[in-house]
Amino acid sequence: MRPKAAMFLMVLAGVLVGCGKPTSYHPSDADTGYVDRSLGEGRWEVSFVANALTSQQRLKQYLLYRAAEITLDAGNDGFVVLDEHPGRGRLSGIKVEGEGTQRPYEFEHNHLWFDSRSFVEGYTTTVYEPMSRYTGTIVFRVFKGENPPQEGTVFDAREIIQTLGPQVFRQR
Protein backbone atom coordinates (compact mmCIF):
# COMPACT_ATOMS: atom_id res chain seq x y z
CA MET A 1 0.00 0.00 0.00
CA ARG A 2 1.23 3.49 -0.80
CA PRO A 3 2.31 5.64 2.17
CA LYS A 4 -0.22 8.39 1.33
CA ALA A 5 -3.07 5.89 1.10
CA ALA A 6 -2.02 4.28 4.37
CA MET A 7 -1.89 7.69 6.09
CA PHE A 8 -5.36 8.57 4.76
CA LEU A 9 -6.81 5.30 6.04
CA MET A 10 -5.24 5.81 9.48
CA VAL A 11 -6.68 9.33 9.75
CA LEU A 12 -10.09 8.14 8.57
CA ALA A 13 -10.09 5.23 11.04
CA GLY A 14 -9.19 7.59 13.89
CA VAL A 15 -12.03 9.92 13.01
CA LEU A 16 -14.53 7.08 12.74
CA VAL A 17 -13.47 5.53 16.06
CA GLY A 18 -13.64 8.90 17.82
CA CYS A 19 -17.03 9.77 16.38
CA GLY A 20 -19.02 6.58 16.81
CA LYS A 21 -22.38 8.28 17.52
CA PRO A 22 -24.01 11.61 16.75
CA THR A 23 -23.48 14.27 19.39
CA SER A 24 -25.93 14.18 22.30
CA TYR A 25 -27.72 17.27 23.59
CA HIS A 26 -25.79 18.71 26.55
CA PRO A 27 -24.07 21.85 27.85
CA SER A 28 -20.62 22.39 26.40
CA ASP A 29 -17.84 20.17 27.62
CA ALA A 30 -14.30 20.11 26.28
CA ASP A 31 -15.40 18.92 22.81
CA THR A 32 -19.12 19.30 22.03
CA GLY A 33 -22.40 20.77 23.30
CA TYR A 34 -24.22 24.07 23.52
CA VAL A 35 -23.15 27.49 24.75
CA ASP A 36 -25.55 30.39 25.08
CA ARG A 37 -25.11 34.04 25.90
CA SER A 38 -27.37 37.01 26.36
CA LEU A 39 -26.89 39.84 23.88
CA GLY A 40 -29.13 42.16 25.93
CA GLU A 41 -32.66 43.46 25.35
CA GLY A 42 -34.14 39.95 25.05
CA ARG A 43 -31.67 38.84 22.38
CA TRP A 44 -29.67 35.64 22.71
CA GLU A 45 -27.07 33.67 20.80
CA VAL A 46 -26.83 29.88 21.02
CA SER A 47 -23.97 27.89 19.49
CA PHE A 48 -23.71 24.13 19.34
CA VAL A 49 -20.52 22.20 18.57
CA ALA A 50 -21.30 18.78 17.10
CA ASN A 51 -19.29 15.85 15.80
CA ALA A 52 -19.16 14.92 12.12
CA LEU A 53 -21.86 12.23 12.50
CA THR A 54 -24.50 14.72 13.66
CA SER A 55 -26.84 15.70 10.83
CA GLN A 56 -27.69 19.27 9.93
CA GLN A 57 -31.31 18.57 10.87
CA ARG A 58 -30.34 17.34 14.34
CA LEU A 59 -28.03 20.33 14.86
CA LYS A 60 -30.88 22.71 13.98
CA GLN A 61 -33.21 20.83 16.34
CA TYR A 62 -30.70 21.23 19.17
CA LEU A 63 -30.36 24.96 18.50
CA LEU A 64 -34.15 25.49 18.44
CA TYR A 65 -34.64 23.31 21.51
CA ARG A 66 -32.07 25.29 23.50
CA ALA A 67 -33.66 28.57 22.36
CA ALA A 68 -37.04 27.28 23.59
CA GLU A 69 -35.56 26.30 26.97
CA ILE A 70 -34.03 29.78 27.40
CA THR A 71 -37.31 31.41 26.35
CA LEU A 72 -39.42 29.47 28.86
CA ASP A 73 -36.85 29.79 31.67
CA ALA A 74 -37.09 33.57 31.32
CA GLY A 75 -40.92 33.47 31.52
CA ASN A 76 -41.51 34.21 27.83
CA ASP A 77 -43.79 32.49 25.31
CA GLY A 78 -41.90 32.44 22.04
CA PHE A 79 -38.84 33.49 20.14
CA VAL A 80 -37.96 34.89 16.75
CA VAL A 81 -34.87 33.61 14.94
CA LEU A 82 -33.03 36.66 13.62
CA ASP A 83 -29.96 34.96 12.16
CA GLU A 84 -28.68 31.42 11.76
CA HIS A 85 -25.48 29.82 10.53
CA PRO A 86 -25.34 26.14 9.60
CA GLY A 87 -22.57 23.97 10.97
CA ARG A 88 -19.20 25.24 9.81
CA GLY A 89 -15.71 23.91 10.26
CA ARG A 90 -12.25 23.71 8.71
CA LEU A 91 -11.04 21.75 5.71
CA SER A 92 -7.33 21.34 5.24
CA GLY A 93 -5.24 19.64 2.61
CA ILE A 94 -2.45 20.16 0.13
CA LYS A 95 -2.80 22.04 -3.14
CA VAL A 96 -0.64 20.59 -5.88
CA GLU A 97 0.59 23.42 -8.06
CA GLY A 98 2.55 23.41 -11.30
CA GLU A 99 5.45 20.97 -11.63
CA GLY A 100 4.51 19.04 -8.49
CA THR A 101 4.94 21.93 -6.05
CA GLN A 102 2.74 21.36 -3.00
CA ARG A 103 1.31 24.03 -0.72
CA PRO A 104 -0.86 23.49 2.39
CA TYR A 105 -4.25 25.19 2.46
CA GLU A 106 -7.06 25.56 4.93
CA PHE A 107 -10.47 27.21 4.68
CA GLU A 108 -13.83 27.25 6.39
CA HIS A 109 -16.74 25.38 4.84
CA ASN A 110 -20.18 23.95 5.56
CA HIS A 111 -19.23 20.40 6.51
CA LEU A 112 -21.33 17.45 5.29
CA TRP A 113 -23.99 19.64 3.65
CA PHE A 114 -21.80 21.30 1.08
CA ASP A 115 -20.49 19.85 -2.16
CA SER A 116 -16.80 20.10 -1.33
CA ARG A 117 -15.75 18.87 -4.77
CA SER A 118 -17.03 22.01 -6.50
CA PHE A 119 -15.79 24.26 -3.70
CA VAL A 120 -12.22 23.05 -3.96
CA GLU A 121 -12.12 23.23 -7.75
CA GLY A 122 -8.56 23.90 -8.80
CA TYR A 123 -7.24 22.21 -5.67
CA THR A 124 -5.90 18.70 -5.99
CA THR A 125 -6.24 17.33 -2.53
CA THR A 126 -3.61 14.73 -1.80
CA VAL A 127 -4.12 14.85 1.96
CA TYR A 128 -7.59 15.41 3.37
CA GLU A 129 -8.15 15.63 7.09
CA PRO A 130 -11.86 15.05 7.74
CA MET A 131 -13.32 17.34 10.34
CA SER A 132 -14.33 15.82 13.60
CA ARG A 133 -16.34 18.83 14.85
CA TYR A 134 -18.29 21.80 13.49
CA THR A 135 -20.41 24.61 14.97
CA GLY A 136 -23.92 25.91 14.22
CA THR A 137 -25.28 29.17 15.67
CA ILE A 138 -28.59 31.04 15.93
CA VAL A 139 -29.41 34.51 17.21
CA PHE A 140 -32.95 35.05 18.48
CA ARG A 141 -35.19 37.47 20.38
CA VAL A 142 -37.64 36.25 23.03
CA PHE A 143 -41.18 37.68 23.37
CA LYS A 144 -44.18 37.37 25.65
CA GLY A 145 -47.80 37.32 24.51
CA GLU A 146 -49.45 36.91 21.14
CA ASN A 147 -47.77 39.74 19.24
CA PRO A 148 -44.31 38.56 18.19
CA PRO A 149 -41.84 40.90 16.55
CA GLN A 150 -42.11 40.77 12.75
CA GLU A 151 -38.39 40.57 12.06
CA GLY A 152 -37.73 36.84 11.57
CA THR A 153 -39.07 33.27 11.84
CA VAL A 154 -41.41 32.97 14.84
CA PHE A 155 -41.53 29.88 17.11
CA ASP A 156 -43.78 28.97 20.03
CA ALA A 157 -41.39 27.77 22.75
CA ARG A 158 -43.82 25.29 24.34
CA GLU A 159 -44.60 23.76 20.95
CA ILE A 160 -40.87 23.35 20.21
CA ILE A 161 -40.29 21.60 23.57
CA GLN A 162 -43.28 19.31 23.01
CA THR A 163 -42.47 18.51 19.36
CA LEU A 164 -38.69 18.21 19.51
CA GLY A 165 -38.35 16.87 23.06
CA PRO A 166 -38.77 13.20 22.07
CA GLN A 167 -36.23 13.64 19.24
CA VAL A 168 -33.52 15.23 21.38
CA PHE A 169 -30.80 12.62 21.92
CA ARG A 170 -29.40 12.75 25.46
CA GLN A 171 -26.44 10.61 26.51
CA ARG A 172 -27.48 8.21 29.23
Image (tube, grey):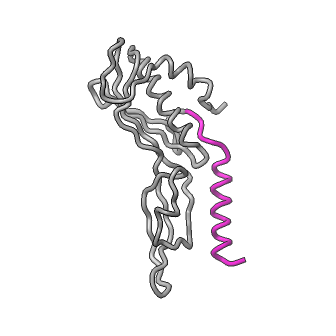
The image shows residue 158, relative to residue 101, as above or below, that is: above
The residue at the far top in this view is: 145
Magenta stretch encompasses residue 12: yes
Residue 84 point in image, percent of width and height? 40, 39
The residue at the far left in this view is: 41
Task: Give the position of the C terminus as an image quadrant.
Answer: top right
Q: Nearer the viewer, residue 20 or 29?
A: 20
The image shows residue 105, relative to residue 58, as above or below, that is: below
Residue 13 point in image, percent of width and height? 68, 59
Residue 165 point in image, percent of width and height? 58, 23
* Residue at figure coordinates x 68%, y 78% from the top left: 2
The image shows residue 83, relative to residue 134, as above or below, that is: above
Chain part drawn in magenta: 1-25
| Quarter-of-image position of residue 5 | bottom right
* Residue at figure coordinates x 68%, y 71% from the top left: 6
Residue 10 point in image, percent of width and height? 67, 65
